[in-house]
Amino acid sequence: VVRMDRIIHNCEAKAAAYYWKRIFPDFLEFRRERYGPPPNNLLNYGYAILRAIVARSLVASGLLPTLGIHHRNQYNAYCLADDIMEPYRPYVDQVVCQIIRGNGRFLEMTPNMKKALLNIPVIDVQIDGQKSPLMNAVQRTTASLTKCFEGKSRKILYPELG
């Protein structure tokens, strides 16, 4: 099991390196690091917004955001939120890409950049064949997870990236 975990982690790391090079071609040396140079600051801000949306939806669906499925950490009160937000991260990445296209290389986040990131909750998302704001789509995801835990469903609704 430990060996398989290492193999999966290594594949995930390779995929991430490929992904970041493709979406941030102007930042050839880019590495995703919490305290790394831009555009890490934009990603951190956007992911914090997304995490808050997911945590709120989990609680509204009657779930405890602390008890994760894949993420496990006694010091992280949002393990389940971190699990559920994964398929929604590309929406944040898209907003960050748009900001970079409009601003090029930068060192500090501007009020206009924050304003663009604060629109994340209302980004149009396709889920279960319907278009809805991201915050509503997340609510549908967390409600479907609750139904799975209750044994009423076997399918978690996730966004359909297009």
Image: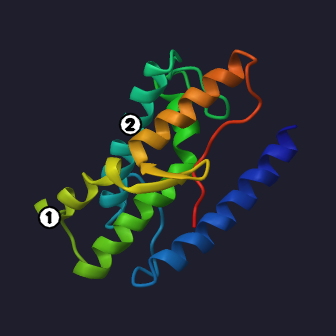
Picture coordinates of residue 83, whole percent (x, y): 58, 37
Picture coordinates of residue 1, whole percent (x, y): 88, 37
Q: Few, some or many C-alpha atoms within 10 Å of disc 1 (few <14, some 14-19, many ≥20)?
A: few
Label drawn at residue 53: 2
Picture coordinates of residue 33, whole percent (x, y): 44, 57
The residue shown at (53%, 18%) is 63
Q: The residue under label 1 is which amino acid type? A: Asn
The image quarter containing residue 72 is: top right
Q: How many marks?
A: 2
Label drawn at residue 13: none
Q: Is residue 158 visible?
A: yes
Q: Which residue is mark 1?
A: 112
SS at badge 1? helix
Q: CA distance from mark 1 to mark 2?
A: 21 Å
Given residues 59 and 144, the one toward you in this image is 144
Q: Is residue 72 visible?
A: no
27 shown above or below 54: below
Given residues 4 and 122, the one toward you in this image is 122
The image quarter containing residue 108 is: bottom left
The residue shown at (25%, 80%) is 102
Residue found at the far left of this picture: 111
SS at badge 2? helix
Q: The residue under label 2 is which amino acid type? A: Ile
The residue shown at (42%, 67%) is 94
149 shown above or below 119: above
Horizontally, residue 43 falls left or right of residue 108, namely right
* The C terminus lies in quadrant: bottom right
Horizontally, residue 112 falls left or right of residue 136, namely left
The residue shown at (45%, 72%) is 30
Q: Few, some or many C-alpha atoms within 10 Å of disc 2 (few <14, some 14-19, many ≥20)?
A: many
